[in-house]
Amino acid sequence: MLRLQGEMIRGGTSKCWIFGHHDVVATGVDADTLLLAAYNAADPRQIDGVGGASSTTSKAAIVQISAEPGIDVEYAFAQVGIGDERVEWTSNCGNCATAVALYAVHNGLVRITSDSTTVRMVNVNTGARLSGTIPTPGRTVTDEGTAAVPGTAALGVPVLLGFEDPAGSTTGRALPTGRTLDTLTGPTGPVEASLVDAGAPAALFEAKAFGLQGTEFLAEFAAAVPALTVLRRQAALAMGLAKENDPVSHAVPKVGVVARPSAYRTTDGTPVGQDEYDLAVRMVSMHAPHPAIGLTSAVALATAAATPGTLAHRVARQTADGTLRLGTPAGVITAQAVPAAEGASPTVLLHRAARRIVRAELLVPVLEGRPA
Amino acid sequence: MLRLQGEMIRGGTSKCWIFGHHDVVATGVDADTLLLAAYNAADPRQIDGVGGASSTTSKAAIVQISAEPGIDVEYAFAQVGIGDERVEWTSNCGNCATAVALYAVHNGLVRITSDSTTVRMVNVNTGARLSGTIPTPGRTVTDEGTAAVPGTAALGVPVLLGFEDPAGSTTGRALPTGRTLDTLTGPTGPVEASLVDAGAPAALFEAKAFGLQGTEFLAEFAAAVPALTVLRRQAALAMGLAKENDPVSHAVPKVGVVARPSAYRTTDGTPVGQDEYDLAVRMVSMHAPHPAIGLTSAVALATAAATPGTLAHRVARQTADGTLRLGTPAGVITAQAVPAAEGASPTVLLHRAARRIVRAELLVPVLEGRPA
């Protein structure tokens, strides 16, 4: 039985286990084997592991101090399989980045020099650069906080999360095909798509192409998930993220639908008026409707909505100050685009929260180099 | 933010957090408040807590050394709410008892004097007495084991779990109404029931009363859950477990259906022949089909099947040696009744497995004596 130190931290609406890179290396086992065993990924209920058996609770990040100038920490994000002995290392997760920032401040991976500490991060999966700014009043770290995010009533430490120069973070181009509109072939024929890369690669469709309003409850939106799963593969090929013979990724690109704002109710029943947000969105997480929205998807939407010719631009209410209020199943999430240095795309800022849930020693059943 | 030591241990097909009674008392907060906050019970996804958002992963036990002669440890079992700020303290859980036994051996709550250590336990919720026997080769404790149980491919330390004198453990009588058959009123009219109390109070019905075979997949059995939820309340009243004005319990009594054995497939697709088991059973856990069977329910079924006149006796294949092979959705679980001292009902033995998953410090958000 291997032993591994870790912290389970809620970042926004995800639970992420955060591990130190040196601790992972010290186990003598490769990270895939270690995570598959620690999470009991083989079991759809993950009953013998630390995973929560849902896409938002089967996540990990492996963190280390970075040698790169201007960067404090680098982290690898892992989406661990559920009833599937695979770890996806191909995407980034903004909620986990929030958790990584809190972990870095608590564990001395960054110096605290004032009442507010910014952790400068690189996600090694995608090369994305992020910043997480956390209050450190009196140069001390806290576990308490009263910040909230849509999708949970729980409170946490406020984290201002910034996606730095997000355009083209994976493929090098904000529009990987060079076009604002493409046509992909879904199970029922051709569908218009906007394929963008900002924060994460994302394939966006109009809700009405699936007979939807884009403001549906999760259970109703679920009907479109099989078609969007097929289209994810088509989009991956079109965006150069995968070749014909590559295994199918269930995480890349992000897929979802957009629509003009209209009045709807959140999952917990709260009414949201047509004027309270600028763009309706329903995203997919692995094989199920995302209960809110992935933050990297929010960055992709902010970029797409600001790009004339895309489906998101076609249906989004345009604002003067660079803010975009996204109407998600969990509530409204506001992304703010802030001008950056010349040559860089605008930084996208999101107000988030994080909370440490446990500090732990995991007992990981690895036998002969494989999950037991 | 309160701090609390705990261990997450898989017992059979459940994940249980085990806490020391002294540690719970030291927080200065009552156990209900502490668990509701630690598990984020208010949230249906338990996203800000250690709960797994399913009935088999939202369990806890609080353990201490017992002053009672012949007993090593006593434990209180808690079923923590999911999207429901309530903790149920009214039932026992055999899977958690398995975890408690492993915890007791690892944490010095019982002396290890030979190659096998028996932990004698009392469940303080119900007064049930149990034993857990664990290999301690060379008088050492191990985290490794190769024992398996139906419902998971994961391996663990073997635990032979014994329910001592289980009849009447909650109400004082194996048949709380004094009858082997009662008639309860369900949503569609009168239904025959056998109300027994052994291991746990249980209300058993014939599958055919709900138009079922008793060998259905979980999704098919789910159709009967609303009716069984109504009947659980009726059974609680008939068995003297609740009075008319008491709040409705979602845990007590256990409810489920029985049927004659017939060929079926387990949830993972494994075929089970008609001759491979003696009694088909589908139980309810809170508001959903139980993926396997609660162990206390297995004890109730073993007792009912051995009692002429009950519905379970009516449909169970009778065996000469006191074993009863239960055909559950997860596979076949064998209960063995062993004669006990005069005046006591037979001990029911079950072969189980447990594994420590994490040793942890929990950060629990309690503010002003309430979950934050």
Image (tube, coloured by chain):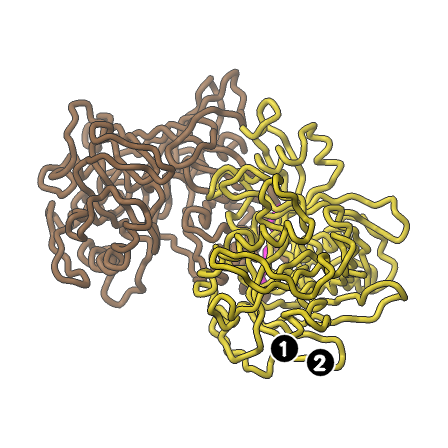
Chain colours: A yellow, B brown
Q: Is residue A13 magenta?
A: no
Q: Main secondary structure of the magenta part?
A: strand
Q: Is there a contact, CB below 8 Å, between mark 2 and mark 1?
A: yes
Residue in the foreground of this view, choosing between A102 and B216: B216
Q: For residue B223, which quarter of the picture?
A: bottom left
The location of residue B253, given as percent across then percent down, is 27, 51
The location of residue B351, given as percent across then percent down, is 36, 28
Q: Is residue A333 visible?
A: yes
Chain of the residue under the numbered disc 2 shown in the image: A
At label 2, the amino acid type is: Thr
Q: Is residue B338 above or below residue B248?
A: above
Asked whether, in this view, residue A270 is left or right of residue B304, the answer is right
- Of callouts 2 and 1, which one flags the residue occurring earlier in the amino acid sequence? 1
Asked whether, in this view, residue A335 is left or right of residue B126, the answer is right
- Residue lying at 61% horizontally and 74% vertically, measured from the top left: A279
At label 1, the amino acid type is: Asp
- Residue lying at 72% horizontally and 75% vertically, measured from the top left: A323
Q: For residue A134, which quarter of the picture?
A: bottom right
What mark, if any, has residue A319 been given in the picture?
2
Magenta extent: B361-366
Residue in the foreground of this view, choosing between B350 and B162: B350
Q: Secondary structure at mark 1?
A: loop
Q: Which quadrant is the N terminus of chain A positioned in?
A: top right
Q: Is residue A151 visible?
A: no
Residue in the foreground of this view, choosing between B28 and B263: B263
* Callout count: 2
Q: Is residue B255 above or below residue A266?
A: above
The location of residue B318, given as percent across then percent down, is 14, 29
Give the residue number, with chain letter if any, for mark 1: A278
**Residue farthest top in this picture:** B138
Same chain for mark 2 and mark 1? The answer is: yes
- Residue lying at 46% horizontally and 47% vertically, measured from the top left: B57
